[in-house]
Amino acid sequence: MKIFFASTDETGISAALKLANAGFKTYFYSPNPYVETKAANHDQLTHRCVNKLEFIKLCAEDRFRVVSEPLNEADETWLHVNTVKEGKDEYASAENIVKLVTEKIEATKALVLSGLTKVGEAEKLLNSFSRRCMADPEEQGYVGGLSLFDSCMPVWTKGTQAPAGLTKLSHVRFNELAAAESATISQIFARAAFVEALVEMTIYSGHHSILTNCINDPALLYPEIIDVLKYFKSQNMPPLVANMFGKIAKTGLKTEKQAVSRISELAKKARKQLRVLVVSHSEAAFNKISANIRSKNVKLHFVSDQSITWENFDSYTGFDGVLVNSLRMDLLKEFHRRYEHVWFVLAV
């Protein structure tokens, strides 16, 4: 079965790969050239549900293919959107991809909307597709958080017949589309609360193994989770939800303060200048950490967390310790395996 999968951003890459992994011939398209290039080249975070060898195999078997133009026919058409990208209202980008696809697609049996939408938007996007498209798909569906969840994905279908792609996903079915959207947002906040509790206990106990042993994903929090937290902090939401982003940001400051304090203590006891590798999500964050470590007995070396791959990991040797200022759990775990002194700063 052939699935045409159109995505507004890079979060759709892992979502499309889940369908390819389930055995469907999946054609991935994005109007954004950056996303198109990212999709064709394996990356631990964007291709999070498959490793590099699995990705190469999917491509070789033609189960995952990146295309530069929308298809004109497919068994199922999937539209993947994120209308709260970087905490901003991005509904317009979702509408644009609906227009792009409906201009091209001539025949499709089913339409599925996936990703992240604010409550009520999924219905509007599905209706917009139906009004514009000559294909007139018999089946319609919605699945929330496809890039994030491996089980209990909120799903809604129009009628009792579900698109074949949805049947392969571990899901929870809702009778109302708005309820499925709400459940998606709820699960994202539940994940954020889980992470917040783990990080707080890590600070309290001083045991990084709480994080490294309890988180199996490549990232502590994925970008689309942060997108939701940022957007809904300014909305009329229950206090626990509305305050979640601010609470996690404050916890991030606690982890930074703790790391700076411990590096300074170690520097006082050292008989030579400490060489500390700082793996950070941005140079601005590195500069902030550097300014807080005032000891002359510490020399910091910056490297972007995006530049570290499994192929070049062995080149990061000869340091007295590593400060990981990132959401990448794979880096934290690997540096813990290689170094006695590892400090973690939550990057939000």
Image (tube, grey):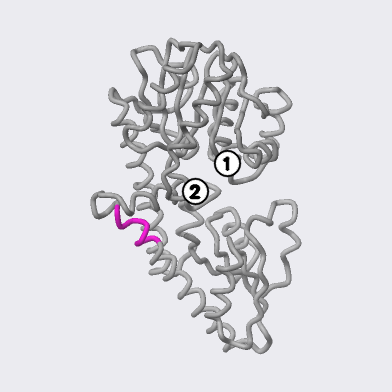
Label 2 environment density (alpha carbons within 10 Å; few <14, some 14–19, many ≥20): some
Label 1 environment density (alpha carbons within 10 Å; few <14, some 14–19, many ≥20): many
Query: In the depicted view, which residue is nearer to us: 29 or 203?
Result: 29
Type of amino acid at the residue the image marks with label 1: Arg
Type of amino acid at the residue the image marks with label 2: Tyr
The answer to whether 283 is drawn above or below residue 165 in the figure is below
Residue at 65% over, 61% down: 304
Q: Residue 343: x percent and y percent?
A: 54, 69
Residue at 57% over, 68% down: 284
C-alpha separation, residue under disc 2 versus residue under disc 1: 10 Å
Element carrying mark 1: loop
Report the span colored magenta. 242-248
Element carrying mark 2: loop
What residue is shown with label 1?
48
Give the position of the N terminus as an image quadrant: top right
Q: Which mark is residue 222?
A: 2
Res 308 → quadrant: bottom right
Residue 226 as seen in the image, left or right of residue 76: left
The answer to whether 173 is drawn above or below residue 106 in the figure is below
Cβ–Cβ below 8 Å for labels 2 and 1? yes
Label 2 or label 1, whichever lies nearer to me, is 2
Q: Residue 269: x percent and y percent?
A: 58, 88
Query: In the depicted view, which residue is nearer to us: 118 or 40?
Result: 118
Q: Residue 292: x percent and y percent?
A: 52, 80
Query: In the depicted view, which residue is nearer to us: 208 or 238?
Result: 238
Magenta segment, prevailing SS (helix, strand or loop): helix
The answer to whether 107 is drawn above or below residue 31 in the figure is above
